[in-house]
Image (cartoon, rainbow, N blue to C red):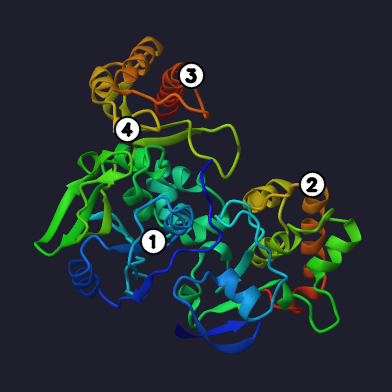
Amino acid sequence: MKEIRLNVNGTEYDIAVRPHATLLEVLREDLGLIGTKEGCGEGECGACTVIIEGKAANSCIVLALEADGKEVTTIEGLADGGKLHPIQEAFVEIGGLQCGFCTPGMMMTATALLSKNPNPTEAEVRDAIRGNLCRCTGYVNIVKAIQLAGKKMQAGGATEGRTS
Amino acid sequence: MRVFYRRLPKFQYIAVRSLDEALAFLAEHRGKAKVLAGGTDLVPQLKKREIELPACVVDLKAIPGLDVISHDRQSGLVLGALATINAVGQNRVVEEKFKALSQAALSMASPQVRNRGTIAGNICNAVPSADSAPALLALNASVKIKGPKGERTVPLDQFFTGPRTTVLGADELLYEILVPNQDRASRGVYLKLSPRHSMDLAVVGVAAVGLLEDGICKAVKIALGAVAPTPVRAPMAEALLTGKVITQGLIDEAARNALTQCSPIDDHRASREYRCDMVYAMTRRALAHIFGR
């Protein structure tokens, strides 16, 4: 076991991890943050997407030890208390989900995209979510929701929630 | 069916702070240690138990300055071993002066994978379909390697030895990729054929970089991916074009000649015949693009 310090959604955790544990395993099993999902487990599907130091990453292929000292944002870090993040609001309003399994990953990828490009075109959104697979194939509304989220954030919600 | 374990096998982990520390560790654990940069190839390989399981994983990410992407008139483009695929693909100088490389980088995987995976890792992993390889070959890149016996520079066309094998020793590290400056007027392109838009490997990858002056080809380099045991150059096709007036007929002939470098596999992605046909079609398209025809 090795001691690491993780900053997850603004909270510092000092935690002992196995060297071969992935960040996903530590988030879900040690910290109980089960919003982040495990899909393929090999970096293909994007269900486990979290944001590490401002950049989207597949937490299933990142070792927990690689995240030592880093800032990690998971889906649990989006809402501000009981108030949904504009990205979450937009997904609810548009109905940007079907079974919901890919949704946390989609939202984290959207968070990374919108922090750099607040007003993406449909093509830009599609390019950004190319590593997030939706087995329900509900892409049309997912793309619409991400575009609406961008507009909502520009209209005043931009400083709400954690976007980096 | 291939077994896929959701959990990683056990290994020790060490984060080194300098190249020398990494080399000392690799020398001590000869053949038992695996180098970790982005981990986007290594971690899935370990989960699939696809490679010999290492006793130890050596993480390079804490080595300062190894993620460098720099460019100047003398040394050209320098990519440190930790330069990520996205950092390289989105770099403005790379996009302006080394177009084939930025196109290859941005054709790979997904933003999540590109944020962590490195160009050097793509090269060291050495799969025949590695997208960055044809682009770097066409740009005449070389790699700098450090080991217990010192440093050496290896031209990239002498680096690959077979599918997933290279000249890199178990106690050596590839720490830098060098891409020489190209003529200001030269043009480059990387074309990738894959059935899916994203998260897919190349069925055929073609990179071409060339310089045209008054309709005459002054220099050209063509490199092919996924159609031989290693990424390969097509020197005979290059020779056909060099010094000649470029015509559609000559481009056709060179593209057909590029086939002589191919010995593609027949698999579920594409048949051998299809890959060969596509090498011809895509080489022709790449040449037509760089020569403006």
CA separation in Å, label 2 and label 3: 32 Å
Q: Is residue B198 above or below residue B147?
A: above
Res B39 → quadrant: bottom left
Q: Badge 1 sits on which subunit?
A: B
Q: Is residue A4 left or right of residue B156?
A: right
First in sequence, mark 4 or 3: give its number: 4
SS category of the residue bearing label 2: loop
Amino acid type, callout 2: Cys
- Residue designated by label 1: B83
Identify the amino acid type marked 1: Ala
> Residue A93: which numbered mark, if any?
none
Q: Is residue A146 above or below residue B65?
A: above
| Tag in front: 1 or 4 | 4
Residue identified by numbered label 4:
B229
Q: Are marks 2 and 1 on the same chain?
A: no
Give the Cα distance between marks 1 and 3: 34 Å
Residue B162 lies, with reference to residue A114, above or below; the image says: above
The residue identified by callout 3 is B274
Q: Which residue is under mark 2?
A: A136
Secondary element under disc 3, as helix, strand or loop, is helix
**Residue B189 visible at all:** yes
Query: Which amino acid lies under the numbered mark 3 shown in the image of this protein?
Result: Tyr
